[in-house]
Amino acid sequence: MDDAQLRTVWQQRQLNDRATHVGEPLAVLMKHTLSKRYRQLSRLAAIWDQVVPEPIRDHTALEGFSGGVLTVVVDSAPHRFQLQMLLRGGLLRAIQANFSGAVNKVRLIPGQFASVDLAGDRRYEF
């Protein structure tokens, strides 16, 4: 065997360091997945504050936005009913007109939430 062949065989028999830093996959996740979702939800939160009346808005929290469906947690049945009536009466069209993406549906789910976070800010503001 000549030197080139010996070098090739030696390189093939060396153990490969397959360990990667945890930060690399997290950076990819943050850059490509979470940052886009964060920007969309923050823009939707600003629009939500503009178009939803304050008495109802205080009883809601934006939970998520995926596939054109905005998920909103509502803490009581009467406020959920009022919000459904507003959505049918044109609130959804107002959200769609102000948002650059596609909001096809607003899904209302019952639930409880803390209206403020640990810093005292509204829960869904970014």
Image (cartoon, rainbow, N blue to C red):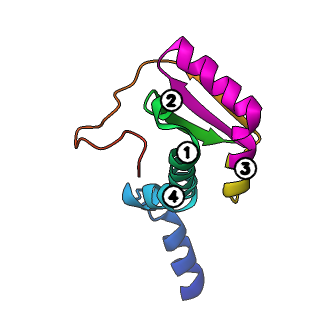
Which mark is first along the chain, 1 or 3?
1
Q: Which contiguous range is marked in magenta?
A: 67-94
Towards the viewer: 51 or 6: 51
Identity, as a three-letter code, of the amino acid under mark 4: Ser
Question: Are the residues flagged by discs 3 and 1 in contact, CB closer than 8 Å?
Answer: no
Going from N to C along the chain, the mark reached first, 2 or 4, is: 4
Disc 2 vs disc 4: which is toward the camera?
A: 2
Q: Quick one: 23 or 53, which is closer to the camera?
A: 53
Q: Which residue is mark 3?
A: 96
Q: Position of residue 75 (x, y in %)?
A: 47, 19
The amino acid marked with disc number 3 is Gln
On the rendered structure, is 75 left or right of 123? right
Whole-percent x, y for residue 110 in the image: 54, 17
Measure the C-alpha gap from mark 2 to mark 4: 29 Å
Task: Please tell me whether mark 3 or mark 4 is closer to you in this view.
Answer: 3
Say whether disc 3 or disc 4 marks the residue closer to the N-terminus.
Answer: 4
Residue assigned mark 1: 48
Residue 1 seen in the current view: no
User: In the rendering, which numbered label is found on residue 35?
Assistant: 4
